[in-house]
Image: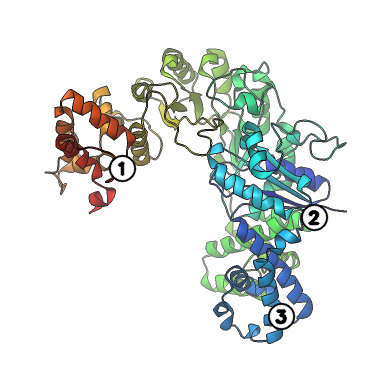
C-alpha cells in the first residue's frame, strides 16, 4: 500500500532549499509513495487538510456545484469561524450545506487533524540552532500529524548538533549526520538516500521562493580535513570524502526537471581533495567550462510531461497556473489576453486550487503555441559557485589555474582571522594572476578576534581591489556558538573582546551596506572610518548617528562636500558634539560610561547612573531613528 508522506521545513527564512528533504522526496517517490512538501504556518496546514476534506465531502453530496471555486472562503471560515465570511454567497444559505461546513469547522476546532492523523511518515528538517523555538514548535505540531510516533523523522544540522536537547523537547530521537547508509529509513532497503538526486518538484508546491534558485545543488566532496574550533562541519560530516560524481545527478535532473542554469556546490573544502583535478574536469564535462552559456528549457513542456506521468501533480498543477499567468502578462494584444483569460476561467484554471490535471491537459493545444510565442530563451552565462568557500592555505598557482578553467563566480575565500592575512593576501593575488578577478570572502568576527582585526581585514580587501584591479566583496559574519547550551536558542553570544554596543555598531553599518563591502576606498571609509581611530569612534557612536551619519556628522559632510552642496541639515553636528563630550570625560567617568554604553541599553530604568556629566553623554544615545526621520 502506498504511504502518505509529509515533509516539512520550518517557517524560517533561508537562502537554500532543503537538500536533505529533496533527496528523501526522491526516495519515497521511487517507492511509489504519495509525497507532500510544506513550508509555512503549521496551523494553516491544518486548515488546508480540513478544507480539502470538506470540499471532497461537498463534491460527493452536492456534485452539481463546483466547490473548489469557494476554497478561499471555506479556508477563511474554517480558520476563523466567522459566519459573515459566508453570508454574501447564496450557495451557503442552505441549512444542509451550512451544517456540513459547520461540522468541518468543529473538526478543526477539535483538532481532528491530531486525533485522526492521516500521514504514515512525517519528516522535518532542522537548520541553525538559533531557530530553536520555531523548529521545536514545528516538530511538536507535525509529530501529531503522523499515525505512529516512531514514523516521525527529524534530521539536519540542529538535530545533529543537539540530539539530546531535541529529544528532550520533542520526544523524537533525531537522525544524526547524513543518511549515507543503506536502510536508513526502511530497514533492509539497499538505497543510500544521501546519494540520490534531488526532487526539485517539491519547491513548486509552496509559495516560498528560495533566493538561491535555478541551480543544480550538489556536493562533490564531503567533510573537511580541518578541525576549526568555531566550525560544526566535523560533527555534521565527520569523514572526508574526496570525490562524489556529479554527472549522473545532472542527467537525471535534466530529464525530469529541465536544465538548470548554475552549479552551486556546498563542499566545505574542495581543495583538500586528492581528486581535485578530476572534479574540475567533470564540472567542465557537465557544461560549466570557461565561457559556458545556458538557454532556459521549455518549462511548459516539462510541466505537461510530468503531469502526464503523474509525477507530483500538486506541484505541476501550481506550476501550470503560474505559466498561464505569465503568458497572459507577456501577450501584447489586449483582445488576445482577454480571450485567453476567459478560456482559463471557463476551464477553472486561473487558480491552483481550482485547476485540475485533466483541464490543463485539455488546454494544451491552445496554450503550447502561445508559450512558444511568448517565451524566446536567450543565452545567459552559467556560473560555478563553491558556496562554502575554499581554504586560502591550500591555494596554489596550479589549482587556481585549474579552477579558472570553469566559470567560477565568485571565488569565495574564507578570511576567518587576522593571523591569516599574509596567507590570505598571497592567495588572492594567486587567484587574480590565474585570471579569477571576481572574489568574495567570509570574515568571521565576534569569536576570538578583536574589533580592530575586522577593520584591518576589510581595509585589506579594499586595498587589494585597487592594487589588483579586482572585485572583492567582503561579508562579515558574526560568530554564534551553535551548540553551546547557553546560547543555541538565540544570537546573544558576545566574544571576549566584543560587547553588545560594538556588535550593534557593526550591524548598523552592515544594514546600510546591505551586508557586504565592495571595492571603493571612499565608500569603505564612509562606512567604517578612514583609520582605526575613526572605526573606534563608530563603535562607540550612538546607533542613530551611525545610520544617519551624513545627517549628524558635519566633518563627514565636509569630507564629501560635493555630495552635500544642498544638504538641509548642514549645521547639524551632534555626532562630533557627542564625541567631544565623550572624550572630555575624566578617565574614571569615561570607564563608567563605557561600561553602561557597552550594554547597549539606554532607556530610563535600564541602567543606573547618578552622575550628571556621564548622563549628559548618555543623552545622545537616546536619539531614536524616529527622531532622525523627523
Name the spot of residue 578 as percent of width and height, x first. 17, 36
Instruction: Kindly give the residue lying farthest to the left in the view shown.
Output: 571
Q: Counting residues from the N terminus, which is met first, the one under dot 1 or under dot 2?
A: 2
Mark closest to the chain's N terminus, 3 or 2: 3
Q: Position of residue 272 (x, y in %)?
A: 62, 17
Where does label 1 land, which residue?
Answer: 606
Question: In front: mark 3 or mark 2?
Answer: 3
Instruction: Tell me the CA gap for discs 3 and 1.
Output: 62 Å
Pointer 2 residue: 309
Question: How packed is label 1: few (under 14 Cα within 10 Å), some, or many (20 or more)?
Answer: few
Q: Residue 69 sits in which quadrant?
A: bottom right
Q: Is residue 333 left or right of residue 545?
A: right
Q: Secondary structure at mark 3?
A: loop
Sort mark 3 into few (<14), some (14-19) or many (20+) by Cα contacts within 10 Å.
few
Residue 583: image tag: none
Residue 339 falls in image quadrant: bottom right
Left or right: 187 as drawn, with respect to 495? right
Picture coordinates of residue 329, whole percent (x, y): 53, 63
Front position in the image: 74 or 158: 158
Q: Nearer the viewer, residue 393 or 259?
A: 393
Disc number for residue 65:
3
> How packed is label 2: few (under 14 Cα within 10 Å), some, or many (20 or more)?
few
In what quadrant of the picture does the C terminus appear?
bottom left
Residue drawn at (52%, 71%) of the image: 334
SS at mark 2 in the image: loop
Q: Name the secondary structure under disc 1.
A: loop
Q: CA distance from mark 3 to mark 2?
A: 29 Å
Pointer 3 or 1: first along the chain: 3
What is the C-alpha distance between the residues marked 1 and 2?
64 Å
Q: Which residue is found at the position 62% from the left and 23% from the top?
A: 234
Amino acid at each position: 500500500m502506498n504511504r502518505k508522506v509529509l515533509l516539512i521545513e520550518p517557517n524560517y527564512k533561508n537562502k537554500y532549499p532543503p537538500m536533505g528533504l529533496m533527496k528523501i522526496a526522491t526516495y519515497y517517490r521511487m517507492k511509489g509513495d504519495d509525497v507532500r512538501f510544506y513550508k509555512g504556518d503549521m496551523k494553516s496546514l491544518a486548515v488546508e487538510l480540513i478544507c480539502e476534506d470538506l470540499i471532497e465531502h461537498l463534491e460527493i453530496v452536492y456534485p452539481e456545484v463546483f466547490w473548489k471555486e469557494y476554497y478561499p472562503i471555506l479556508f477563511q471560515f474554517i480558520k476563523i469561524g466567522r459566519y459573515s465570511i459566508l453570508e454574501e454567497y447564496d450557495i451557503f444559505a442552505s441549512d444542509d450545506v451550512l451544517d456540513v461546513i459547520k461540522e468541518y469547522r468543529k473538526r478543526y476546532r477539535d483538532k481532528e487533524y491530531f486525533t485522526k492523523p492521516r500521514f504514515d511518515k512525517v519528516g522535518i528538517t532542522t537548520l541553525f540552532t538559533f531557530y530553536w523555538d520555531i523548529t521545536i514548535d514545528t516538530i511538536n505540531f507535525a509529530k501529531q500529524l503522523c499515525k505512529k510516533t516512531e514514523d516521525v523523522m527529524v534530521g539536519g544540522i540542529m538535530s545533529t548538533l543537539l540530539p539530546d536537547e531535541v529529544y528532550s523537547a520533542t520526544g523524537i530521537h533525531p537522525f544524526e549526520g547524513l543518511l549515507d547508509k543503506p536502510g536508513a529509513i526502511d530497514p533492509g532497503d539497499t538505497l543510500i538516500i544521501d546519494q540520490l538526486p534531488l526532487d526539485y518538484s517539491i519547491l513548486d508546491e509552496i509559495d516560498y521562493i528560495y533566493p538561491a534558485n535555478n541551480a543544480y545543488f550538489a556536493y562533490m566532496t564531503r567533510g573537511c580535513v580541518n578541525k576549526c574550533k568555531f566550525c560544526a562541519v566535523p560533527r555534521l560530516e565527520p569523514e572526508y570524502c574526496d570525490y562524489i560524481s556529479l554527472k549522473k545527478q545532472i542527467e537525471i535532473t535534466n530529464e525530469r526537471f529541465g536544465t538548470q542554469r548554475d552549479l552551486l556546490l556546498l563542499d566545505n573544502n574542495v581543495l583538500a581533495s586528492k581528486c581535485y583535478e578530476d572534479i574540475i574536469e567533470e564540472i567542465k564535462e557537465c557544461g560549466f567550462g570557461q565561457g559556458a552559456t545556458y538557454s532556459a528549457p521549455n518549462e511548459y513542456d516539462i510541466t505537461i510531461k510530468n503531469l502526464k506521468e503523474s509525477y507530483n501533480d500538486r506541484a505541476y498543477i501550481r506550476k501550470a497556473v503560474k505559466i498561464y499567468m505569465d503568458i497572459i502578462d507577456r501577450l501584447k494584444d489586449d483582445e488576445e489576453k482577454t480571450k485567453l483569460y476567459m478560456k482559463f476561467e471557463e476551464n477553472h484554471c486561473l487558480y491552483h486550487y481550482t485547476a485540475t490535471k485533466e483541464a490543463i491537459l485539455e488546454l494544451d493545444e491552445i496554450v503550447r503555441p502561445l508559450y512558444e510565442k511568448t517565451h524566446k530563451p536567450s543565452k545567459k552565462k552559467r556560473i560555478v559557485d563553491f558556496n562554502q568557500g575554499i581554504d586560502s592555505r591550500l591555494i596554489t598557482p596550479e589549482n587556481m589555474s585549474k579552477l579558472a578553467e570553469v566559470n567560477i563566480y565568485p571565488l569565495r575565500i574564507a578570511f576567518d582571522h587576522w593571523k591569516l592575512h599574509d596567507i590570505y593576501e598571497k592567495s588572492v593575488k594567486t587567484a587574480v594572476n590565474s585570471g579569477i578577478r571576481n572574489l568574495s570572502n567570509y570574515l568571521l568576527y565576534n569569536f576570538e578576534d578583536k574589533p580592530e582585526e575586522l577593520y584591518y581585514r576589510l581595509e585589506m580587501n579594499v586595498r587589494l581591489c585597487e592594487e589588483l584591479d579586482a572585485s572583492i566583496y567582503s561579508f562579515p559574519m558574526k560568530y554564534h556558538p551553535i551548540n553551546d547550551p547557553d546560547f543555541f536558542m538565540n544570537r546573544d553570544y558576545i566574544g571576549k573582546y566584543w560587547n553588545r554596543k560594538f556588535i550593534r555598531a557593526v550591524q548598523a553599518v552592515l544594514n546600510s551596506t546591505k551586508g557586504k563591502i565592495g571595492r571603493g576606498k571612499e565608500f569603505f571609509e564612509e562606512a567604517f572610518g578612514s583609520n582605526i581611530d575613526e572605526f573606534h569612534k563608530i563603535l562607540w557612536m550612538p546607533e542613530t548617528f551611525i545610520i544617519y551619519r551624513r545627517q549628524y556628522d558635519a566633518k563627514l559632510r565636509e569630507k564629501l562636500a560635493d555630495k552635500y552642496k544642498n544638504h538641509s541639515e548642514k549645521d547639524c553636528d551632534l555626532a562630533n558634539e557627542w564625541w567631544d563630550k565623550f572624550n572630555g570625560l575624566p578617565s574614571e567617568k569615561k570607564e563608567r560610561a563605557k561600561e553602561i554604553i557597552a550594554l547597549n541599553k539606554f532607556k530610563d530604568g535600564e541602567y543606573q547612573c547618578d552622575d550628571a556629566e556621564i548622563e549628559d553623554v548618555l543623552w545622545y544615545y537616546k536619539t531614536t531613528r524616529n527622531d532622525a526621520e523627523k
